[in-house]
Image (cartoon, rainbow, N blue to C red):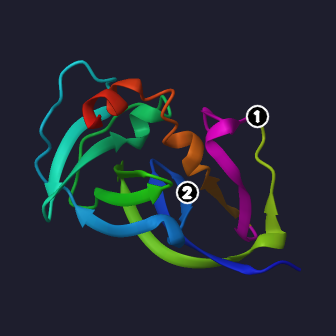
Amino acid sequence: MGEDLKFIMFSLGNESYGVEVDHVNTIERMVPITRVPKTPSFIKGVINLRGSVLPIIDLRGRFGLEESEYTEQTRIIIVFIKDIEVGLIVDAANDVIDINSGSIESAPEVVGGIRAKYLHGIAKIDQDRVLVLLNLTEVLNKNEIVQLEEFEG
């Protein structure tokens, strides 16, 4: 068996997703977002979080899913990988869960309309539930978020 890894569980629609706790700074309630011109539609803008200006990505838009209204449950998960720190808008942030790395399977080509390159793998939580684990390196791929790079640089 592999090692136990901790994941923040969150939802988009009826699906459960996870991102490694090691890449999460904080989970915030929705705050006003300042729109930035000439950015892809999934980049909602920027926020000022305790003195840091952070770009905000709506994961529904990033994955090509239908957008929905923000609710009391909507959260911004502040994540970082390499030299990028970004807020990800999710429908709800649910829990922290331990998953053994040996129980993570490769992601199929498409899961719920999301291309496999955005996915690290699939983990079975229990008999009838799976957790889709995100590949943050691809979700935050600078080559695909050119305008984000121009804004920061």
Instruction: Name the quadrant containing residue 35.
Output: top left
Across and down, in percent, residue 150 comes to: 31, 27
Across and down, in percent, residue 133 comes to: 63, 56
Across and down, in percent, residue 90 comes to: 37, 52
Residue drawn at x 81%, y 69% as measured from the top left: 103
Q: Which residue is mark 1?
A: 109
Q: Earlier in the sequence, mark 2 or mark 1?
A: 2
Instruction: Name the quadrant containing residue 42.
Output: top left
Question: SS class of the residue under badge 2?
Answer: strand
Q: Which mark is residue 22?
A: none
Across and down, in percent, residue 7 comes to: 56, 71
Query: Residue 8: in sight, yes or no?
Result: no
Looking at the image, residue 46 sits to the left or right of residue 20; the answer is: left
For badge 1, the amino acid type reads Glu
Q: CA distance from mark 2 to mark 1?
A: 16 Å
Query: Residue 72: in sight, yes or no?
Result: yes
Residue drawn at x 77%, y 71% as measured from the top left: 101
Looking at the image, residue 145 sits to the left or right of residue 33; the answer is: right
Q: Which mark is residue 17?
A: 2
Please, what is the dominant secondary structure of the magenta stretch?
A: strand
Task: Decide: is 134 above or below 123.
Answer: above
Q: Residues within 10 Å of mark 1 (few under 14, many from 20)?
A: few
Front residue of 37/110: it is 37
Q: In the displayed image of the protein, which residue is found farthest to the top?
A: 38
Residue 137 part of the magenta segment: no
Residue drawn at x 20%, y 42% as measured from the top left: 46
Q: In the displayed image of the protein, which residue is found farthest to the front?
A: 153
Residue 126 part of the magenta segment: yes
Query: Over which residues does the magenta segment extend?
Result: 110-127
Task: Decide: is 112 above or below 84.
Answer: above
Question: SS class of the residue under badge 1?
Answer: loop
